Amino acid sequence: MTTPGSCPSSTSAAHSPVCLAPSAAAGESQEMVRPRMVLFGDSITEQSFRPGGWGAALADTYSRKADVVVRGYGGYNTRWALFLLHQIFPLVGIAPPLATTVFFGANDAALLGRTGERQHVPIAEYKENLKKIVNHLKDCSKSMLIVLITPPPIDEDGRERFARSLYGEEARKLPERTNEMAGVYASQCIELAREMNIHCIDIWSKMQETAGWQKLYLSDGLHLTPEGNAVVHKEVVQTLRSVGLKAEEMPYDFPHHSRIDGSCPEKAFQ
């Protein structure tokens, strides 16, 4: 007779060994065995799981260590993002994320009187909205790592070429976004992070440190090329590692295959 959690001492040639798992106690809850990292933002986050995207690269970096969950919403600004908080980050009923990136501002910085003015959020409101998002995340978990990411720089010539490729001579004559304005919003994002004692990645400045960043990092003057995605991925990983979230030191959710005994696999899962 075989007892739960043990393996038979001998087996017939016709049958594989049968290992009986101990039954869970009545009413015992099943907790998530793999923590989550949530990427919250606009289209730059939504597109991050495309080939070469920074979200897909992050999921690969933390494969079997954490689930990387994308919650990106193209065209959204911080004002609209507030409506999503309780659905994406409920205060009860689900384990909070281990870490969350908040990557908004590219749409908030759209200029008034231009084609993207519907997305515009005044700079003071932008900062206040980010503060509300951060406070909600802190209410979800006191230990969650919160990482703000500034809007990226803008290549105004690239935006114009992109518009002309879509609309030809009907393309707008004035830019709907400028790099100068993106920098103003980036500075408020950095300032808020400092005030709230949380991490911030200044991607606006980081990208502009490289000569030719306009074409190297931006595909249409705003969204990221694979090289631009690689910059974001590197900065996010460095931030995670700085607080001890090093993939190589985090436990696997289930045993590595090398720890599984072929004659009695049950032992590895006890």
Image: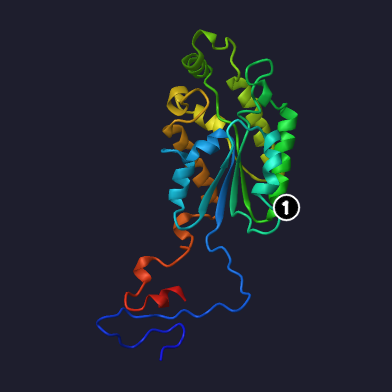
What residue does disc 1 label? 139
Direction from residue 83 to residue 160 in the image, left or right: left
**How far from the left and from the top, in percent, is residue 5?**
45, 82
The picture quadrant where one finds residue 149 is top right
**How far from the left and from the top, in percent, is residue 10?**
31, 87
At 74% from the left and 31% from the top, the residue drawn is 125
Q: Nearer the viewer, residue 100 or 244?
A: 100
**How far from the left and from the top, in percent, is residue 233?**
48, 41
Total numbered labels placed on residues in the image: 1
For residue 178, above or below residue 7: above
- Residue 194 makes an appearance in the image: no
At 43% from the left and 49% from the top, the residue drawn is 60
Q: Residue furthest front?
A: 14
Direction from residue 7 to residue 94 in the image, left or right: right
**How far from the left and from the top, in percent, is residue 247?**
47, 55
At 41% from the left and 76% from the top, the residue drawn is 266
Image quadrant holding the N terminus, namely: bottom left
Give the amino acid type for the residue marked by disc 1 in the picture. Asp
